[in-house]
Amino acid sequence: MFGLLKSKKEPLIADAEQRKIVEAIKKAERNTSGEVRVFVESRCSYVDAMDRAKEIFFKLQMDRTEEHNGVLVYVALEDRQMALYGDEGIYKKTGGDPYWVYELNMMKRSFQEGKIADGIANCVINIGTALAQHFPYNIDTDKNELPDDIVFGN
C-alpha cells in the first residue's frame, strides 16, 4: 500500500543551489539600481526561448522598473533552453546582442559541465557588474523594485 503513495515532487533546483542563486541576485544588485530575476521551469512552451523569456518578463512586470534596467535570466531545464531578456535601458547600454550572447554561452558552458546553479549564479553576477557600470547604486534614491527570489514555472 505504501508503495502506491506518490512522493513529493522533487524541486527543479535543490535548496542549497537555490540559496546560491538568490545570494548571487542579492550580490549583483548591491552596487546597482538595476534588477535581476531568475525564472526556472522544466519545459519551454515556445519554440524560441527568447519569446518565452519576453512573455515572462512582462508577466512579472519587470518592464515597470524606473530606469528600464531589469534583466530576466530564463532557464527551461529539461528542454535545455535558456535566454536573457534585458529591458531597453540595459540592453542598449551593453551594446546589444554580443554582450548577451556571450553571457548565454558562458552559462551554457557551465550547464554542459553539470554546474546548473553555478552557471546561473555566475551569469547573474556578471549581469550585476554590467548593471553597476551603467546604473550605479544611489543610496538616496535606490530601492529594491523587484523580489530577489527565484520564480519557478512548471
Image: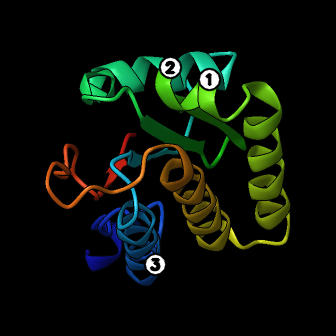
Q: Which mark is residue 115?
A: none
**Quarter of the figure with the C terminus:** top left
Residue 87 in sight here: no
CA separation in Å, label 3 and label 2: 28 Å
Q: Position of residue 51 (x, y in %)?
A: 58, 15
Residue that label 1 marks? 92
14 displayed left or right of 105? left
Q: Nearer the viewer, mark 3 or mark 2?
A: 2
Considering only vertical position in the picture, is 126 above or below 1? Answer: above
- Name the residue type under label 2: Glu
Q: Does dot 3 land on a helix, a strand or a loop? A: helix
Q: Position of residue 129 (x, y in %)?
A: 57, 59
Whether the residues at callouts 3 and 2 have beta carbons within 8 Å, the answer is no
Residue density around tag 2, few if under 14, some if 14–19, many if 20 or more, within 10 Å: some
30 displayed left or right of 140? right
**Quarter of the figure with the N terminus:** bottom left
Q: Position of residue 56 (x, y in %)?
A: 40, 25
Residue under the image location 34 percent in, 19 percent down: 58
- Name the residue type under label 1: Lys
- Name the residue type under label 3: Lys
111 displayed left or right of 23? right
Total count of labels: 3
Residue under the image location 72 percent in, 25 percent down: 96
Residue that label 3 marks? 20
Residue that label 2 marks? 88
Q: Does dot 1 land on a helix, a strand or a loop? A: helix
CA separation in Å, label 1 and label 3: 29 Å
Say which of 102 and 5 sits in front.
Answer: 102
Q: Position of residue 103 (x, y in %)?
A: 75, 49
